[in-house]
Image (cartoon, helix red, strand yellow):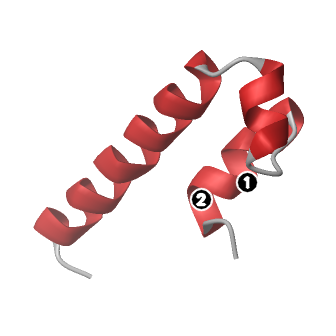
């Protein structure tokens, strides 16, 4: 994997973690995510 692609994927991961972390528990529940799953969801996607 190229360095450029690795960086893009890492940046997307961090943006996803940040976005989900800023959501309320109610908003997370609406999309089917628990707060403790944020890292896993960011790493692997919703499905």
The quadrant of the picture occupied by the C terminus is bottom right
Q: Residues within 10 Å of mark 1 (few under 14, many from 20)?
A: few
- Give the structural element (helix, strand or loop) at label 2: helix
Residue plotted at (49% across, 27% down)? 18
Residue at 22% over, 58% down = 8
Q: Is residue 2 above or below residue 25?
A: below
Point out residue 36 in the picture as x, y percentages from the top left corner: 87, 35
As measured in the structure, the alpha-carbon distance from the residue carrying label 1 to the one carrying label 2 is 5 Å
> In the image, is residue 20 above or below residue 41?
above
CB contact under 8 Å: marks 1 and 2: yes
If the image is split into quadrants, where does the N terminus sit?
A: bottom left
To which quarter of the image does residue 22 belong?
top right
Which residue position holds label 1?
Answer: 40
Left or right, residue 36 beside residue 20: right
Q: Residue 37: x and y, percent?
A: 82, 45
In the rendered image of this protein, does residue 31 appear above or below residue 17? below
Residue occupying the point 59% across, 32% down = 20
Question: Left of 39 or right of it: where is 5?
Answer: left
Q: How many marks?
A: 2
Query: Can you identify the residue that label 2 sits on?
Result: 43
The one nearer the camera, 1 or 13, is 13
């Amino acid at each position: 994997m190229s360095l450029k692609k690795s960086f893009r994927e890492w940046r997307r991961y961090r943006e996803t973690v940040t976005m989900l972390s800023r959501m309320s528990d109610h908003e997370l529940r609406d999309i089917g995510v628990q707060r403790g799953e944020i890292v896993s969801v960011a790493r692997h996607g919703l499905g």
